[in-house]
Each structure stands twice: as structure tokens, then as C-alpha cells.
């Protein structure tokens, strides 16, 4: 009787059940970290070769652009750092500088958030290649009541949380809201 009830519960589908541990959020040991896409809240160091007045640190604003000296707003939202650099270089080369050389690097990534059954929930800086164990360690570990089997993640800009199996290869992205639930017993 107990086995039949367990089988019935296990076969129930629907929202709220953890999906199979696969897909773009799950990495393996040999995975290369994907190309990072810029977003609101990222800080960049932009260097224009031989132009100290144009070189500096700049933030991606709420409109998704970076305001650079002389050329104004350059779209950053959703672009890779290389794409952003090429656009800035092309804009500087369009009547402002002769053969400009522009490079950019991210110096601060937008944060991720971790809530629920971790010792110190809150906002934390993101690092490239972050996984669930790294995020939990950043928040000083699980509480004794934590559900270590599943985790809920809301992607930046998404309307709903998704439930995932808590696995060492579960990727966390910048802007993610990670919620560790409480176990039932």
C-alpha cells in the first residue's frame, strides 16, 4: 500500500516538481564558461589607447547603455564585451580619432541574490562560472532546516521561479534570485 502511494506521488507531474538535471543551467567538468553578456549594473573599464582622457571606469546604466566621453551612449545590454568594444571603437573612429584602439573589461558584475535557508541571505557579487555550491558558500552555507535537494531560481527579467535539482553543476547567472526552501521534516 505504501509503495502504491509513493508511486502515485512520484508519477504526478506539474509545476513545482524539480525538472531532470539537464539543460543550459547544468554544467559538466569540461564545460567552458559561456560568453558573458553585459547587463544593467555591470561596471566596465574602457581603455582607449593613447587617450588617457577617454579611458576610465563606466557603468551600464538603467537604459542598458554606457555613456562614454565624446561619443555619448553606446549600447551594452545583451552584448558581449568584445561586441561593446568594437562598437565603441567604430564610433570613436567615425570622425573623432584616427585608428582608435579600444578595449574593455568587466570589473564588477551585477550581483545575484540568495534567499531562504542559508546562513546569511542577501545580495552578493557574481563571479564568472558560479555554480549553486559556490553561491551557497558565499552565503555562509545552508541552515539546518534547508532543503538540499531542490532550489528555486528566478532569472533576471523572468516572471516566475523555476525549480531545479540542487546539483554541483547548477549554474547561477548574474541577476539571478536563488531561493533555498525549507525541508518538510
Image (tube, rainbow, N blue to C red):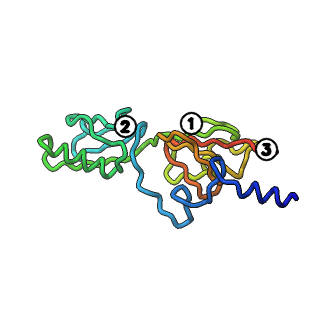
Name the mark nearer the viewer: 1 or 3. 3
Give the SS element for disc 1: strand
- Tell which circle, 3 or 2, labels the residue nearer the N-terminal end: 2
Left or right of 41, for residue 69: left
Which residue is denoted by mark 3 in the rendering? 184
Left or right of 145, for residue 169: left
Q: Is mark 3 in CB contact (under 8 Å) with mark 2?
A: no
Residue drawn at the location 37% of the way across and 37% of the way down: 60
- Tell which circle, 1 or 2, labels the residue nearer the N-terminal end: 2
Left or right of 137, for residue 57: left
Give the SS element for disc 2: loop
Quadrant occupied by the N terminus: bottom right
Left or right of 40, for residue 100: left
Quadrant occupied by the C terminus: top right
Q: Residue furthest top?
A: 62
Residue drawn at the location 60% of the way across and 43% of the way down: 178
Among the 4 quarters of the image, the one containing residue 61: top left
Q: Pinpoint residue 4: horizontal percent, then vertical percent.
A: 82, 60
Task: Name above or below for residue 75 compared with residue 7.
Answer: above
Task: Name above or below for residue 29 compared with residue 64.
Answer: below
Name the mark nearer the viewer: 3 or 2. 3
Which residue is denoted by mark 1 in the rendering? 123
Which residue is denoted by mark 2 in the rendering? 60
Q: Distance between the Cα atoms at labels 1 and 2?
A: 18 Å
Amino acid at each position: 500500500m505504501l509503495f502504491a502511494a509513493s508511486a502515485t506521488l512520484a508519477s504526478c507531474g506539474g509545476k513545482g516538481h524539480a525538472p531532470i538535471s539537464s539543460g543550459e543551467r547544468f554544467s559538466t567538468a569540461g564545460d567552458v564558461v559561456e560568453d558573458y553578456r553585459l547587463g544593467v549594473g555591470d561596471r566596465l573599464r574602457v581603455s582607449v589607447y593613447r587617450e588617457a582622457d577617454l579611458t576610465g571606469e563606466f557603468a551600464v546604466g538603467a537604459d542598458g547603455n554606457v555613456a562614454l566621453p565624446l561619443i555619448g551612449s553606446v549600447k551594452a545590454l545583451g552584448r558581449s564585451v568584445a561586441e561593446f568594444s568594437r562598437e565603441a571603437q567604430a564610433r570613436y573612429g567615425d570622425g573623432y580619432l584616427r585608428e582608435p584602439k579600444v578595449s574593455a573589461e568587466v570589473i564588477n558584475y551585477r550581483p545575484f541574490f540568495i534567499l531562504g535557508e542559508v546562513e546569511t541571505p542577501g545580495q552578493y557579487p557574481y563571479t564568472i562560472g558560479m555554480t549553486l555550491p559556490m553561491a551557497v558558500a558565499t552565503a555562509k552555507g545552508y541552515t539546518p532546516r534547508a532543503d538540499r535537494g531542490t532550489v528555486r531560481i528566478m532569472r533576471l527579467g523572468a516572471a516566475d521561479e523555476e525549480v531545479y535539482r540542487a546539483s554541483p553543476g547548477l549554474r547561477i547567472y548574474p541577476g539571478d534570485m536563488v531561493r533555498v526552501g525549507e525541508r518538510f521534516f
